[in-house]
Amino acid sequence: MAAPYENVPPANLEGKYMAIIVCWLLGNGCLVSWNSMLTIGDYYSDLFPKYHSARVLTLVYQPFALGTLAILAYHEAKINTRRRNLFGYILFFISSFLVLVLDLATSGKGGLGTFIGICAISGAFGVADAHVQGGMVGDLSFMRPEFIQSFLAGLAASGALTSALRLITKAAFESTKDGLRKGALLFFAISTFFELLCVLLYAFAFPKLAIVKYYRSKAASEGSKTVTADLAAGGIQTLPQQEAEEDPKQLERLSNKELLFQNIDYALDMFLIYVLTLSIFPGFLSEDTGSHSLGAWYALVLIAMYNAWDLIGRYIPLLKFLKLESRKGLMIAILSRFLLIPAFYFTAKYGDQGWMILLTSFLGLTNGYLTVCVLTSAPKGYKGPEQNALGNLLVLFLLGGIFAGVTLDWLWLIGKGWTLFVWPSACPILLSPLTAHLVTWICSLLVCK
């Protein structure tokens, strides 16, 4: 069966705005569960006061996400994207439901066993994120830039919406018995429902949109094997390969190594954006900003401001005259963000809460803006299969930056009673031989293919 959209210009295809909405919802579902776990950090801090839950849960999450995505990025050309993304969203759904089950089974009691269970679920979120975020960014990289921008905006929206909901639930339940727990349970009940919605949207709605079928058909005609199942779900069983038979070079693609070397600056951009952001957010903002007039609300307000401005920043590149596409300009802007580290340090030590809220807002704004600029600029000029591979590689470096950032975040504790044992006890992942092997293995995957 021939691809029905083969000769139709993208502008004339139906479903563009519906696809943008679905991408936004799917992006939201990619992080809503994890953001819910971060946003109820005050509940876990109360439940596990000795374990630095905001930092530990993030540190547990990242090795699973990074290691899984390294494997998936290496094999991306052979992986069924539909099965990969559905597995990720289903795992998000099951893990979110297990948070509810664990809390109800333990009657909201703390302890080491419960904390280990929460950490295990955090690791499952990491595995799910590696499947969905890399898979979706790779898939959307060969479609319209608006789609990937909408998906990235959805990622940020999950943080903004969970922060807003957390402020509401805290105000509603603050004076009631077990108020923190009731708010936390409500959070994960909503997350569980939303993840189920994402499973249904990706399985039945997204592959049937005309514009999505057009771009997937185009990618398949250029040699992509990852879209076959999604095309079948959209009613396209086979694709003609007449042009490929006439010109075999049409199916040739750059290797992962070649793509990485051609885009090493973009890869470093993604790494540096997130190593800076995660060295400050959420651990430093949750524990190290001192006491202020907002009291218990202070950390929640900071996290809410970060998430809100991160979301705003992801929409700014839609205005073409504000979008930064210069590779050199992007690198300069990203490196200049590291001035925020001394700014946060001195503001926490000497400034008031107004300056800290301003800095946090700027951190979120630049994080969202630069992420969208890089991920929408990098895939231009490549074939569909190459764009898919490049999307996976850039997300791998993004997660690598997050992993490095949450590890370096522990350095803020030096001088606060952790000087002598912060490295051996709090950062075993950074120093262990296992991490050295993990980093070496990931690098070898990237350059060997």
Image (tube, rainbow, N blue to C red):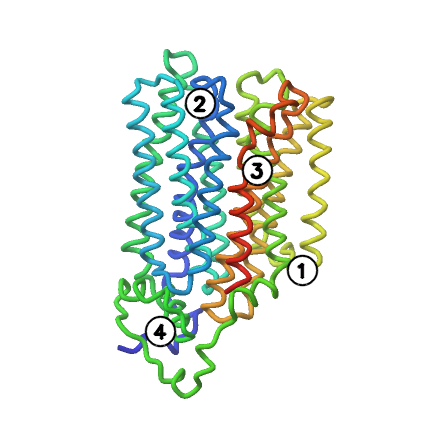
Foreground: disc 3 or disc 4: 3
Foreground: disc 1 or disc 2: 2
Mark 2: which amino acid? Tyr
Determine the CA span between mark 3 and mark 1: 31 Å
According to the picture, the residue beneath numbered tag 1 turns out to be 327
Expressed as whole percent of the image width and height from the top left, the position of residue 123 reads 41, 38
Q: Residue at x 28, y 49 (%)?
A: 200
Identify which residue, 234 or 257, lies in the foreground: 257
Foreground: disc 4 or disc 1: 1
Determine the CA span between mark 2 and mark 3: 24 Å
Determine the CA span between mark 4 and mark 2: 51 Å
Which structural element holds mark 3?
helix
Determine the CA span between mark 1 and mark 2: 41 Å
Q: Sequence order check: which comes first, mark 4 or mark 1?
A: 4
Determine the CA span between mark 3 and mark 4: 50 Å
Q: Residues within 10 Å of mark 4 (few under 14, many from 20)?
A: some
Mark 3: which amino acid? Leu
Q: Residue at x 38, y 25 (%)?
A: 184
Q: Quadrant of the N terminus?
A: bottom left
According to the picture, the residue beneath numbered tag 4 turns out to be 5
Expressed as whole percent of the image width and height from the top left, the position of residue 201 reads 31, 51
| 439 sits to left or right of 37 | right
According to the picture, the residue beneath numbered tag 3 turns out to be 430
Q: Residues within 10 Å of mark 1 (few under 14, many from 20)?
A: some
